[in-house]
Amino acid sequence: MINYGRQSINHNDVKSVIKVLKSDFLTQGPVLEKFEQNLNFFFKSKFAVAVSSGTSALNLISNILGWKKKDLVIVSPITFLSSANCILQSGATPHFVDINMQDYSFDLIKLETEIIKLIKKRKKPKAVIVTDYAGHPADWIKLKKLKNKYGFKLINDNCHSIGASIKKNYGYAIKYADLVALSFHPVKNITTGEGGAILTNDTKHYRLLKSLRSHGVVKNSKMLKKYGPWYYEMRYLGNNYRMSDIHASLGISQLKRIKKFVKKRNFIANYYNNIFSDKSKFNIPKKRKDCEHSFHLYPLLLNFKKIKKNKKKIYYEFLKNKIKLQVHYIPVNFQPYYNKVIKFDKKKFKNSLEFYNKQISMPMYYDLNLKQLKYIKKISKKIFHI
Ligand SMILES: Cc1ncc(COP(=O)(O)O)c(C=O)c1O
């Protein structure tokens, strides 16, 4: 079966993990610190806090920003559930804004209009969570201008975009956003099994994140000297969001290959672009000139009228040929839970709905070889009559 995504594990990854298994520390030892240093080096951030998942990263971000009941945080419907759930879990309310049909991130005109409307109602949003969908950086220069104009926190859900760049800068995410969330789930551009991280340049945020990752506990040499070596203080209500040294060791060896991973993903994307070049039937992913796409996903939009088949039929035809597609995403605000707790006008989400109705994700992962790609091409030609 060719899945829509999967990990790539080589001999060095295995060696790296085995080394930790034979060492003194399985969790929160020197390897975790080294992974965090390497993340800082690659993403040009001052601080990285590795955690148990991308979801943990987003939950911790919502925690340190102190959102509470009646606060509003803006988020896109075309993202994974966690980007919006972290807002609800903090007690605040997600406010959804439609996407644009270029990079599938926010429609920036709708975003600004919505912010102005909210400010008029004395409901200024506390933050905007931006997902760099599929691995394409959003328009961060314009987003930063909006942040400076209206004064909200800017968060980059960068879970899809590890290895993407703006003007060759792989550290673009923390250059523009206050906080960045990463995921290292196996289908992502690098993996630690389960895992995630938060990037920040703010010392206060860093200290708080480190404490909250481990039950809100604070421990320092001054305390130990005064009260005894066993001493620690719980100052905040945290949780166990820790990443183990086992996971971090895989992260270290995976991060070494990130540029190679992204290069191959771009090769696969170009291969697909050639297959799906008929503009009357397909919309292929667009790229802004100043960006390098990291192609966590290859989102393909289908014109079903022209293709004369519906999405379900296409999905099953690929599956019959052992190719498993996926759809990213059902708009989060249309999910039954959200539909129940948040009232919204469906007409305001025309692009998100159109996108969901037309989108499929083609298989995209480093280990897809030319033989498999040729096979996908053969099956696609048959299914789409191209
Ligand atoms: C955009 C986005 N945000 C957050 C997450 C959550 O990451 P994790 O699965 O590591 O919790 C994901 C993962 O699917 C994601 O795609």
Image: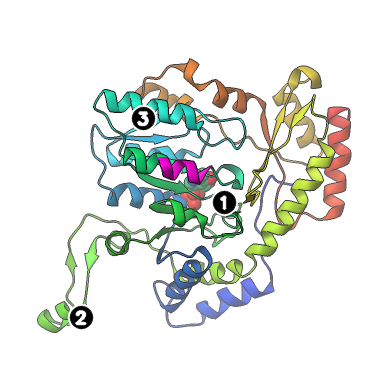
Q: Position of residue 39 (x, y in %)?
A: 49, 67
On the rendered structure, is 260 left or right of 215?
right
Quadrant position of residue 353: top right
Q: Earlier in the sequence, mark 2 or mark 1?
A: 1
Residue sitting at x 83%, y 48%: 373
**Of the two numbered discs 2 and 1 in the rendering, the one whose residue sits closer to the viewer:** 1
Pointer 3: residues within 10 angstroms few (<14), some, or many (20+)? many
The stretch of residues the image draws in magenta is 139-145
**Of the two numbered discs 3 and 1 in the rendering, the one whose residue sits closer to the viewer:** 3
Q: Earlier in the sequence, mark 2 or mark 3?
A: 3
User: Please, what is the three-letter code of the amino acid marked with disc 2?
Assistant: Ser
User: Please, what is the three-letter code of the amino acid marked with disc 3?
Assistant: Ile
Camera-side residue of 276 and 52 = 276
Residue sitting at x 56%, y 74%: 17
Quadrant position of residue 213: bottom left
Q: Which mark is residue 115?
A: 3
Quadrant position of residue 225: bottom left
Residue sitting at x 39%, y 45%: 154
Q: Position of residue 299 (x, y in %)?
A: 67, 38
Q: Is residue 130 above or below residue 339?
A: below
User: Please, what is the three-letter code of the amino acid marked with disc 1?
Assistant: Ser
